[in-house]
């Protein structure tokens, strides 16, 4: 009970606990015998922000002690925080596996899967013309809500990023932001589901 932060509340009946506290008790039961492998289904469900942080810290500590912690969750931004290695499974079929970066790199090798980059720049029209001249760029759109932001689509991110810095320097552009909305796990899963 100490490892899950429940030592001061362990004298109540199970029904007297909140959902988050019951979740902590279930994890305490699971780790009681120091397992080599721990399988957790939605381990952060019902926990408040402090409880979530504590549970993530506990899982990290267990992993550092040699326990293999397997987490099943549909809350993908939490999965990114929790794990080193990810299996994306849909209907019993493995879609991808590895670190988030490994999965992203594998997707980048597939030229059929375009990658989106958002670029906010001081001279968007001139930058759009320069970008569109690149062989790796398949599309450039202006953001309706922010006229300085470009939405770039590329089928070869490595080639795009290798040349982008040269374009920025030679064009003397002032770049305010550079983001790839496809770089988080939820977007990657959506892309994988659409192409399979």
Image (spheres, rainbow, N blue to C red):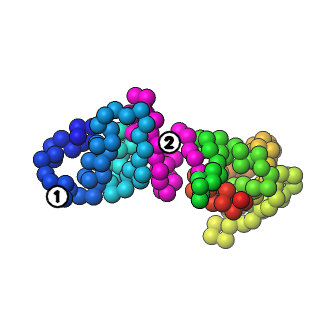
Give the residue at mark 1.
Answer: 16
User: Image check: 71 left or right of 185?
Assistant: left
- Toward which corner of the image does residue 128 lie, by quadrant? bottom right
**Residue 141, position as x, y percentages in the image:** 75, 65
Residue 18 visible to an observer of this rendering? yes
Query: Measuring 77% from the left and 46% from the top, which residue is drawn there?
Result: 109
Graded by Cα atoms within 10 Å as few (under 14), some (14 to 19) or many (20 or more), the crowding at tag 1 reads few
Considering every residue shown, the one lying at the far bottom of the view is: 144
- Callout 1: SS: helix
- Callout 2: SS: loop
Of residues 65 and 51, the one nearer the viewer is: 65
**Residue 68, position as x, y percentages in the image:** 46, 35
Q: Disc 2 or 1, which lies upstream in sequence?
A: 1
Query: Measuring 50% from the left and 42% from the top, which residue is drawn there?
Result: 83
- Toward which corner of the image does residue 170 lie, by quadrant? top right
Query: Measuring 29% from the left and 43% from the top, which residue is drawn there?
Result: 29
- Magenta region: which residues? 59-88
Of residues 160 and 51, the one nearer the viewer is: 51
User: Image check: 174 left or right of 80?
Assistant: right
User: In 3D space, how far apart are the residues under numbered discs 2 and 1 (Cα atoms)?
Assistant: 32 Å
Give the residue at mark 2.
Answer: 83
């Amino acid at each position: 009970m100490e490892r899950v932060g429940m030592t001061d509340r362990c004298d109540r009946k199970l029904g007297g606990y909140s959902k988050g506290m019951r979740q902590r008790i279930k994890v305490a039961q699971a780790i009681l015998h120091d397992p080599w492998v721990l399988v957790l289904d939605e381990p952060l469900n019902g926990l408040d922000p402090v409880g979530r942080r504590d549970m993530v810290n506990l899982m990290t500590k267990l992993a550092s002690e040699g326990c293999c912690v397997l987490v099943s969750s549909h809350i993908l931004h939490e999965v990114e925080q929790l794990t080193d290695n990810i299996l994306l499974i849909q209907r019993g079929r493995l879609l991808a596996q590895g670190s988030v970066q490994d999965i992203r790199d594998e997707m980048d090798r597939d030229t059929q899967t375009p990658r989106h980059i958002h670029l906010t720049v001081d001279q968007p029209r001139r930058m759009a013309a320069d970008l569109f001249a690149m062989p790796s760029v398949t599309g450039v759109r202006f953001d309706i809500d922010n006229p300085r932001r470009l939405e770039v689509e590329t089928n070869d991110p490595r080639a795009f990023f290798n040349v982008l810095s040269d374009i920025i320097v030679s064009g003397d552009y002032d770049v305010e932001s550079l983001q790839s909305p496809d770089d988080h796990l939820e977007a990657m899963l959506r892309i994988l589901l659409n192409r399979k």
